Amino acid sequence: MHPKIKNSIIIGIIFIVITAAGGYYTLSVQKKELTKKEVKLNELMSTYSSPEIIQAKFVEVENRVAIIDSLLFTGKLLIPNNLPQSKFFDFVNAYSGDNTISTYTSTTFMSRETENGFCYYKYRVFGIDSYTNVFNLIYAIEHSKELKKIISAELSATNLVNKQGGARYYVKFDLEVRVYFSSNDQFAAVNYEENNLVPRTINDAFYPVVKTSTIKPKRGDLADVQDGSLISLVPQGAFIIDSDGNTKLMQKGDEVFMGYLTDIDYDKQTVTFVLNKGGMIEYQTMKLGENFKNKGKQK
């Protein structure tokens, strides 16, 4: 067979196969797809055949959004959408209290990270302030409507002395805070109110029980018996060596620095003093031949 005739037959067969396959796809497969889309189109046209129907559907969807939004509104916490970094700086300024010449609150942005599909900004909040202001700031961060969490906190007492010699008691604080947000509005309410961020009044946990400012300065004629010793008992009283090395004859009821001699026991060869150390009452005993020993404490 001539090669030209052979090639023509092969091309003809290929053309017939392609035509048959295209006809099958068009008349069978594609027709079924077109039928489904026509049905869907007819359904949509019947559902949204007029502006009134479209408006009614819109109102229905709007009501559903309002229900979801109300659930987010009544929840204690929510995660906002695309939160700006500057918002937390404003939040700290609003709830850190009024700073004075001796106090301050500083906020530093550290990084942006992700956790369990949510984003968060990490901040460092540190400074020196009164216990009440520090507590109010921590309470506001932990109970804010927009989710914020204190990851770590370091608190310590610090004292400042004014020009008149009076002590002021402050708290030095250093907080690591995460402020969460989302890249979508799934967890955010359209309109919401901030939670009540005013805590109840509490006692200052860092306020000193014993304040050195309440201890009166030692007068020159009073014996400081804290490091003293009992050297002799006589009918007239007891010979005491005070912390300065001075020897004094003392009787029951005599005043000493921060207290009084309250008891002389000749049988046990002891003397007992009561000392007021800035509000802490201590009963202390000296025994003949021994250094001053602590007998016990009473508040």
Image: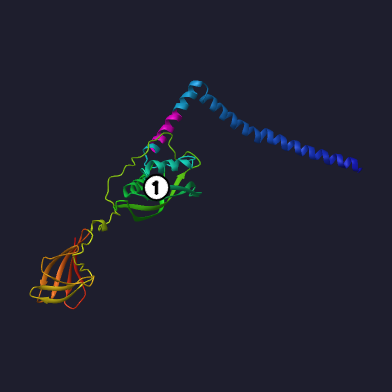
The vertical placement of 230 against 140, above or below, is below
Residue 268 appears in the picture as rendered: no
Q: Count the numbered circles shown.
A: 1
Q: Residues within 10 Å of mark 1 (few under 14, many from 20)?
A: some
Determine which quarter of the picture holds residue 224.
bottom left
The vertical placement of 209 against 185, above or below, is below
Extent of the magenta region: 60-71
Q: Position of residue 47 (x, y in %)?
A: 51, 25
Dot 1 corresponds to which residue? 104
Task: Between residue 5 and residue 288, name the one nearer to us.
Answer: 288
Outermost residue toward the left in this view: 235
Which residue corresponds to the image point at 44% horizontal and 43% vertical from the top-left? 89
Q: Position of residue 216 (x, y in %)?
A: 22, 58
The disc labelled 1 sits on which kind of residue? Tyr
Secondary structure type for disc 1? strand
Residue 179 appears in the picture as rendered: yes
Q: Position of residue 277 (x, y in %)?
A: 22, 61
Determine which quarter of the picture holds residue 35.
top right
Which residue corresponds to the image point at 56% horizontal and 26% vertical from the top-left? 42
In the displayed structure, does residue 289 sit left or right of residue 16? left
In the displayed structure, does residue 133 sit left or right of residue 250? right
Which residue corresponds to the image point at 35% horizontal and 52% vertical from the top-left? 171
- Chief SS of the magenta region: helix
In the displayed structure, does residue 67 sit left or right of residue 24? left
Quarter of the picture holding the C terminus:
bottom left
Outermost residue toward the front in this view: 220
In the displayed structure, does residue 206 sit left or right of residue 37? left
Q: Is residue 64 on the magenta stretch?
A: yes
Quarter of the picture holding the N terminus:
top right
Task: Between residue 120 and residue 276, name the one nearer to us.
Answer: 276
